[in-house]
Every structure is written in structure tokens, then in C-alpha cells.
Amino acid sequence: MLWSGWGDPAKAADLPEPVRELLHDLLGVRAPATPAAALSEVRLPPPALPGSALARLTGAVGAEHVRTGDETRIRHTRGKSTPDLLRIRAGDGSDAPDAVVLPGSHEEVLQVLRACAEERVAVVPFGGGTSVVGGLAAARDGFAGVIALDLARLAGLRSLDAESMVAEFGPGTRAPEAERLLAGHGLTLGHFPQSFEYATLGGFAAARSSGQASAGYGRFDDLVAGLTVATPRGTLELGRAPKSAAGPDLRQLVLGSEGAFGVITSLRLRVRRAPAEKVYEGWRFASFAAGSAALRALAQQGPLPAVLRLSDETETMVGLAKPGEIGAGEPGCLVIAGFEGADVRARREAAGAVLAGHGGVALGEEPGRAWAHGRFAAPYLRDSLLAVGATVETLETAGFWSNLPRLYDAVRLTLHAELGSPLVMCHISHVYETGASLYFTVVTAQSGDPVEQWERAKTAVSAAIVAAGGTISHHHGVGRDHRDAYAEEIGPLGVEILRAVKDRLDPAGVLNPGALVP
């Protein structure tokens, strides 16, 4: 993973000159006055970890698995939100952990957590480092130091119950490796979010991830049959049956908890047969409203494709659904429908009849193939835009179908009020019988302080989402960025419940302090 951007550095590409000129003419984008810092220029605070804590951590996992070198610390600094990248590109490594600790077993995680609780050292669980909501920058106040608990050694397929279709994985398993291991058995998780290339299964669970094929395979929390969790107080073993009426489901307490309640050390996941066939196709609708009505019909009446997404007029015109062809979009609103499995033809024909009945025009498979080819490319495009002086960031929410137009307007109006004349694009990419998600991409010219520029806009748009009746996050999570809005969403009593759980499982408050819990 590129330390100052996204993904494989070899895949990074400069923006074509016509696109640069378009950004300048439309948005006033100008090249940054200061070039991005080199790795050697990142300013790090001196390690603050007490000697007694370092000795205990070394005793728990071995000296070779406690790392304090500058590059290792930088590579575990924050996540991959635009503010995260702007800060690190400016050479700001102030949130770097004092050490990176790599445990090799559940028992070692327990030892590390006990030591950190007693030594007052904050612990940030670290998987793929792909958080975009400030989930990997611990609050240091009141702590003797901060470590990143890298779960890379807790990886791999541990067991497979082929009869029950349940696979056990280590939380540090990266998504592509999980798919490779399952493919050898003719199986798949079917979970392909935009972070797929680098994110880990433990991170998916901790943040309630949702993949691009969620309509067909479900969200990641739908896949979790069981969990093993290490806490400073001991071990939680959760999930002994597909469903249970034995009180509240404590798995749901861990899913989405972002490392604030415990560290996931094992995952038992539902798997599916790998699809025999995949066909993705495109449809055009005259308006976002018409396309939304068609998606709602499929969600409520079926048949539901595995992938179903609708770009609004702006996103379609820009061509963001095809990142390799930015600026080559067409009028109207583009729908991508993806069909996977053994009965693709019948479901495709039935879904096509619904889409056509709502005014859709079939575009064939080319738009679907183009989307599938570039489905993981958007973060690389963001890096290219940042390099030429554009601030580009994403935000997402979800709501009931009846409230989506209000939510859509509230977000767009607020972004325009805060940023002047930004380019605001949106798509629906996760649908349910009762509602859907809205995913926005925002591009604007960088101000003299682009971090402050975006944080001001994000604060305003978060308030607008809550006021308009949406959730503060459908799949990115809470972290630090959404914590205050999350508190307003769940109310004072909900906050008290979270704090009570935190106090019981983590009395010293060392687990990812500042994230999730208001």
C-alpha cells in the first residue's frame, strides 16, 4: 500500500492534460504551491512508549514483532480519508503510533491488551489501513503511549465446514487472499467493496462493510456466523447457531464496534458457491428519479441482481462509473446491473422487463464490462486529483425510499453552500426493500488550508444528514469523523449504553480511544 496514497504505486497515473484543463476551467483548480513530502520528510514525534511497556510487549509477542522504525510507524499513521492523505502529504506524522505490534495468536492479543491496560497504552487495531472516517488515529491524552496492533500474522483459512457452508478465517486475512483460498473449494464470500484489494476480513466486520454485490450476497455483517473477540477483561466467543432466541445477539455488539470494545481474533463466515456465470450490463434512464423508481421496483418485487447501482445525471455525465474514461459520459442516468449464478439468463430477462417497464433503455454489456474493469480504480483517481490541487472526497448515507429525495437534496445543497461551486456526484449502490444508500463524490479546488476546508464542509453536511433523517453512515463507519453526529443519531440514552459497554469490556479505555464512543 502506498504510504501517502492508495494502493499499488505502479497503478498510479497522472491526469491527462484535457482533464486538468477542465478542472481549471470549471472549478478553478490550480497546482499546489508545495509539492508532496517525501517519506524521509515526514515529521514524526519521538516514540513515547515507556520502557516497562515496551518490555512487556516484547515479552508477549517477541522482539521481532515489536517495530519502532520510522517507516513502519508512518505506514501505520491514520487511514485513507482525504484529510488523512492531505496531512501525510504535507509531512504531518503527528498521529503516528509509538510502536507497531504484531501478535501471532489470540493468547498473544490477550497478553498485549492486559499489558496495555495496566501500562495506560492506547491500542489501535490495524488491518488494511483503509479507514476513511478517522478510525485509526487514537486520542493520546491521558495515555503513556500508543501502539498499532497489526493483525497481519492472524491470517489465513483456518477451517471449512463444507456441510454448513461456514469458513473460519483469521481477521488479518486480506480480501483477495480470502477469495483465492475459497476459490480452491469452488466457494466465495461475494464481498467486493471498493477497498477490496487491501482491506482485511476483520476490518470488514469491525466497520460493517458493504460490498458492491450486496444485493446478491448481503452486507458483511450478514455473512458473520461467529466471532472470537479478545478484550482487556478476557475472551468473548459469539455465535453457536445460525439464529438464536437466546437474548440479544451479542455479535451485533462487536460488528461495527471499530476496535473500541475488543479485538476480533477469529471470524466464522457464511460462504456461497462461486457463480458459474457473471454478466454485467448497462441501462439508461432519463432522470435520477426514474432510475430510483426502477431500482425500488426490483428491490421490492424482484428479481434482484447481485450488483445494482444508479448514477445521477452529474456522475453519469462525468463518467465516474467508468474511471478509465473520465469526461466521456453521456446524458441521462446510468444503471449497472450485474447477474451472477447458474440462472443468469432468466433473471436477466425478468429484471430487464422491470427496468424497461420503468422507462429504461438497454445499453448492452459494454457499460457493465467497463464498470467491472474499473470497479476498484476510483481511489487511484482521487490520488491523481489531489496531486493537481483538487480536493476530492466521498461521503455516504442511507434512508427509506420515501425520504431519499429529501436526503439527496439536503446533502447537495449543503455542499454547495459550504464549498461554493463544487462538482457533486451521487449514486445509489446498495438497495433494500425499504430503502437505499446514497454515495456522494465531491470535487472542489483546494483552498489554502484544504484540511480545514473539507472538515468544515463535512461537519455541516453531517448535521444536514441527521436533520434530514438519514443515518450518518451506511458502510464507512463512525471513527472520529462521525462520532458527534452518531451521538445525535442514537440520542443521549444510546450514548450511555455505548459508554457502559465500553466501561465493562475496556475499563482503562485503551481500545481505540476517540473512535466510535462519544
Image (cartoon, rainbow, N blue to C red):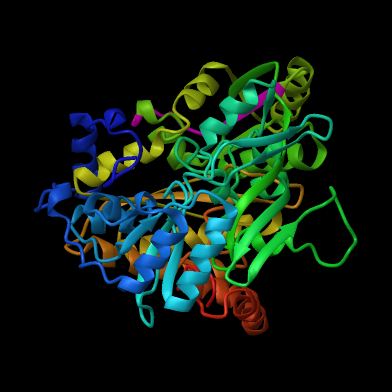
Can residue 402 be seen at all in this image of the molecule?
yes
Q: Is residue 36 above or below residue 165?
A: below
The answer to whether residue 165 is above or below residue 343 is below
Q: Looking at the image, which residue sits at the far left?
A: 33
Asked whether the viewer can see residue 283, the reply is no
- Residue 210 point in image, percent of width and height: 60, 46
Report how many numbered discs are placed on residues in the image: 0
| The quarter of the displayed image where residue 139 is located | bottom left
Q: Bounds of the magenta span?
A: 326-340
Q: Position of residue 449 (x, y in %)?
A: 20, 64
Q: Residue furthest right?
A: 245
Left or right: 425, with 35 as reference point = right
302 to the left or right of 129: right
Name the image quarter holding the N terminus: top left
Q: Toward the viewer: 103 or 340?
A: 103
Q: Is residue 439 left or right of residue 42?
A: right
Q: Nearer the viewer, residue 49 or 248?
A: 49
Q: Does residue 225 show up magenta in the picture?
A: no
Residue 155 sits in quarter: top right
Identify whether 322 is placed above or below 396: above
Residue 25: name its quadrant.
top left
Determine whether, in the image, residue 405 is placed left or right of residue 66.
right
Residue at image point 32% right, 57% down? 77
How far across and how far down the image is residue 357, in percent? 74, 29
In percent of width and height, residue 12 lies at 28, 32
Magenta-drawn stretch contains 337: yes
Q: Closest to the observer: 434 or 178?
A: 178
Instruction: Decide which of 483, 139 is in the foreground and name it.
Output: 139
Q: Residue at x 25, y 46 (%)?
A: 386
